[in-house]
Image (cartoon, rainbow, N blue to C red):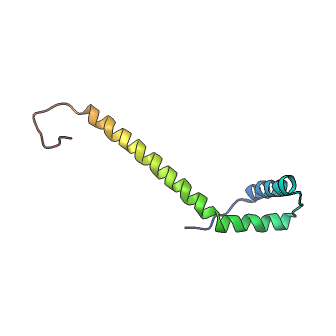
Amino acid sequence: MSKIEFSADEKSILNAKIQKYFQDELNQEIGQFDADFLLDFFAEEVGPYFYNRGLHDAQALMSAQLDNISDALYELEKPTEFRGHDR
């Protein structure tokens, strides 16, 4: 898996959210450098769990959609005397 990286704009937004969280929930100020360091830590250590969960959810959704397509195609089949492909 490649490293989880954010654009400069994304990092700026995420760092601001980290700083706001520390201020609002923990009554502590955290500087830009510390927020950036914390973001890098979470991206490296926690990010893969969220990434893998997203992949798992996407795979489950795609599998369900493929089942729906398979069922729809089966419904389009015309009846014949050939029995080699009965379900």
Where residue 28 sits in the image (x, y, percent)? 89, 60
Q: Which residue lies at the image location 23% right of the left edge and 33% below the top edge?
A: 77
Where residue 37 sits in the image (x, y, percent)? 77, 68
Q: In which quadrant of the rendered view does residue 73 lie?
A: top left
Q: Which residue lies at the image location 69% right of the left edge and 65% below the top edge?
A: 42
Where residue 86 sits in the image (x, y, percent)? 17, 40
Which residue is nearer to you in this view: 24 or 52? 24
Q: In which quadrant of the rendered view does residue 17 lie?
A: bottom right
Q: Is residue 17 left or right of residue 46?
A: right
Residue at the front extreme, as displayed: 26
Where residue 84 sits in the image (x, y, percent)? 13, 43
Q: Which residue lies at the image location 66% right of the left edge and 68% below the top edge?
A: 44
Which residue is nearer to you in this view: 19 or 75? 19
Indicate the quadrant containing the C terminus: top left, top right, bottom left or bottom right: top left
Indicate the quadrant containing the N terminus: top left, top right, bottom left or bottom right: bottom right
Q: Is residue 50 left or right of residue 72?
A: right
Which residue is nearer to you in this view: 48 or 27? 27
